[in-house]
Amino acid sequence: MKKLSLIAMMALAALSFQACNGGAKSGATDSSAAVKDTADSANKVKDTTTTGATGIAVTADDAKFATGAANAGLAEVAIGQLASEKATNAKVKDFAKMMVTDHTKANDELMALAKTKNISLPTEPDADHQKKKTELAAKSGADFDKAYVDAMVDGHKKVASMFEDASKNCKDADLKAWAAKTLPTIQHHLAEIEAIQKGMK
């Protein structure tokens, strides 16, 4: 039962992150789709009662949050790099650059934290994000700008809610603190992109 609830939780998280991040590298492949799943599988077999090479220092739910957050962050950087090149609206381009900077920093922090907890993280975005990035890459001009902005607004609403939950409910104090520290940045991103969206109408 617990395993099913974890799977359901991460399925929801993956959808939220997909909406938030819009996509990842173009040319999705089956092997890249397994990256997040591989990290989740590696974490599942670790002993939560010990640490070290075979143990993991956090609960299964906390590990799932970490892999989901990493997947989202990696996708945010990848799609932000695309948008910083393709966007024609100066505000959209600046927002995309902010995504790359802020999420690269958050990704680095999470990677360092995960290492201390022996949590396996994905190293590239999953296939859903890659597919979305491919779809966005096919657009241009104002169509690209609108599609990117809409994806950012929808996604940041969902991801802000997810990080808010993690900042209250993570069992690991360090992960909980990281979620709480990162949440204001996500909320700032949401406010910024909503203002841009409003200005484009």
Image: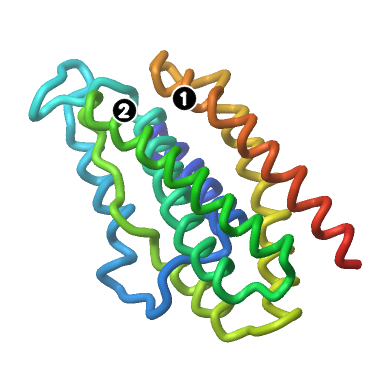
**Residue 140 location (% of width, % of height):** 65, 84
Instruction: Residue under label 1, please give it.
Output: 178
Quarter in which the N terminus is drawn: top left
Label 2 and label 1: CA atoms lie apart by: 9 Å
Could you tell me which secondary element the residue under label 2 belongs to?
helix
User: Which residue corresponds to the image point at 31% horizontal and 28% vertical from the top-left?
Assistant: 113
Q: Name the image quarter holding residue 90.
A: bottom right
Image vertical order of residue 150 relative to residue 136, above or below: above
Asked whether 67 or 25 is in front, the reply is 25
**Residue 136 location (% of width, % of height):** 58, 76
User: Which residue corresponds to the image point at 41% horizontal and 13% vertical from the top-left?
Assistant: 173
User: Which residue corresponds to the image point at 31% horizontal and 53% vertical from the top-left?
Assistant: 37
Task: Give the mark, 2 or 1, whose residue is nearer the N terminus.
Answer: 2
Residue 113's disc number: 2
Q: Are marks 2 and 1 in contact (CB under 8 Å)?
A: yes
Circle 1: residue type: Trp
Circle 2: residue type: Leu
Residue 15's disc number: none
